Amino acid sequence: MGDVAHTAGTAVPHDDIDGAELYHPHSWLTKYVFSQDAKVIGVQYALTAIAIGMVALVLSWLMRLQLGFPGTFDFIDPAAYYQFITMHGMIMVVYLLTALFLGGFGNYLIPLMLGARDMVFPYVNMLSYWIYLLAVLVLVASFFAPGGPTGAGWTLYPPQAILSGTPGGQDWGIILMLLSLCLFIIGFTMGGLNYTVTVLQARTRGMTLMRMPLTIWGIFTATVMALLAFPALFVGAVMMLLDRLLGTSFFMPALVEMGQQLSYGGGSPILFQHLFWFFGHPEVYIVALPAFGIVSDLIATHARRNIFGYRMMVWAIVIIGALSFIVWAHHMYVSGMHPWFGFFFATTTLIIAIPTAIKVYNWLLTLWRGNIHLNLPMLFALGFIVTFVNGGLTGLFLGNVVVDVPLSDTMFVVAHFHMVMGVAPVMVIYGALYHWYPKVTGRMLDDMMGKIHFWVTFLGAYLIFFPMHYLGLLGVPRRYHDIGQTSFVPDSAHTLNAFISVVALVVGAAQLLFLFNLFWSLRRGKEAGPNPWNATTLEWQTPETPPGHGNWGRELPVVYRWAYDYSVPGAARDFTPQNEPPPAAAP
């Protein structure tokens, strides 16, 4: 096996670099609020992301009430419905998933898994969180602004995004949305540079790149992608702000509104679509790659098996990240393009499925003949694999032009997108939270509440989104406030919409049970001990649980092996930590 090389080497370079100078907090405020400790910042990111994510959950409930029971709730008028769609989509994709995977897990895990004391730029790290929080507050402020938040759809396509016929188009809604996105990108850039430099420069002795856990590889690659992709969105947001506030025409063609000629002329709405999706498709993998890495670690740990094909998994992550920059226009088939461009982007879309499939095969081969422990992290990891494969298969349909064009504006796209970008990453988030909660708090989450949460979430997600594929194949359109009496939509579709809405309310309630478990277990959860999962990676080898300031006490750990020495033949235990010397090197 090619992976044996990871455990064979015992040579460790000399410690010729002085330890990092740590910032020491002098008050409760600088320890827990304006903290420069990456662990505290990670928790701050996570709590803020979960809080704004609950707003998105409520918005999804309101949308489903309208779709399932149209005309029943007078306050959900067409303008409010489009505002709910816009804010739900943008919050989930950017302010929850991106912030939680990179800001939350990235901050907490990178220094611990690499044997570092902290991020290399702690002050900048602190600023990145507070700018993220400011971005969230600006976004939330649009709910209370005149005209309410923007209703342009989460993709914010011009020209309608800044016209008076769109909710928030001529009020503060679109301005606050674009300003919030700019702030988010500024904050992320501060954090992203921190994550990248820490991975490249602050690894402990013996922690080579090919000994890093796959969680770190996923977060690192996604961070580099985001640093390259977010500028396109930033530029697009600034240009649209100028169109809206100063009357420029970057994206606005000559047009007539309500019989009146507007002052715009010469702009290109398609240009914005290219800028948005040049960010937007890498964004899918900015969320997915950390999820891939985390799932790999969860499966290896809870199946007690070394990860199958470690180097292949690393290169698959890197190749997926690179290919994700040349597939963006498959979101734009209905915008009109030369057939050869359609052929190119359909081809690259199919090619990117190859390294993704490699990862799925390697997960299955890691599970093969493993000592699988069906605890909560493993259940959510398995739920992710099934869901991601199902969502990916429908993506192969939509990646082809002739199939995508008739399905593009139907509920089929909503179902596909939520399986891949909604349910699958959220499964990983929950698996990761159940896995690392004992490290953060020193206590276990309640198992019974967790299993109720898993089964209701997993089965409920399929009861919501599997029927939605069928609605899409019937031709039921997306983004419609009320379908009405449409001849090609049978009565059964309305019944199915009502069923989906009821299930969505139940699944949403299960997330409230998880939140209760999260806070209840802080005081009443079973004590976890230093390494409850018998894991090999460095974060479980800290001298204190939860880890103290500086993570490692007086001396940093030394790494002697890769992160996946599980069930090694002849070993005394079924796991060998990364910082445990091989027998020949022991004194």
Image: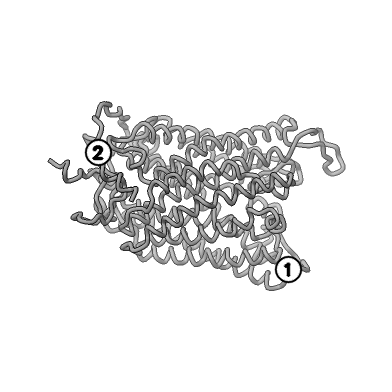
The part of the image, by quadrant, that contains residue 44 is: top left
The residue that label 1 is drawn on is 489
- Decide if residue 519 is in sight here: no
Q: What secondary structure is marked by label 2?
A: loop
Residue 347, image x, y percentages: 62, 49
**Mark 1 or mark 2, earlier in chain:** 1
Crowding near the residue tagged with mark 2, few <14, some 14–19, many ≥20 C-alpha atoms within 10 Å: many
Mark seen at residue 557: 2
Question: What is the image's colouring?
Answer: one colour
Residue 180, image x, y percentages: 58, 38
Left of 6 or right of it: where is 268? Answer: right
Mark seen at residue 319: none
Q: In what quadrant of the picture does the C terminus appear?
A: top left
Residue 21, image x, y percentages: 30, 27
Outermost residue on the front side: it is 1
Left of 136 or right of it: where is 210? Answer: left
- Decide if residue 541 is in sight here: yes
The part of the image, by quadrant, that contains residue 40 is: top left
Left of 20 or right of it: where is 187? Answer: right
Q: What secondary structure is marked by label 1?
A: loop
Image: 480 above or below 24: below
Image: 20 above or below 436: above
Question: What amino acid is found at the position of numbered circle 2 in the picture?
Answer: Pro
Labels 1, 2: front one:
2
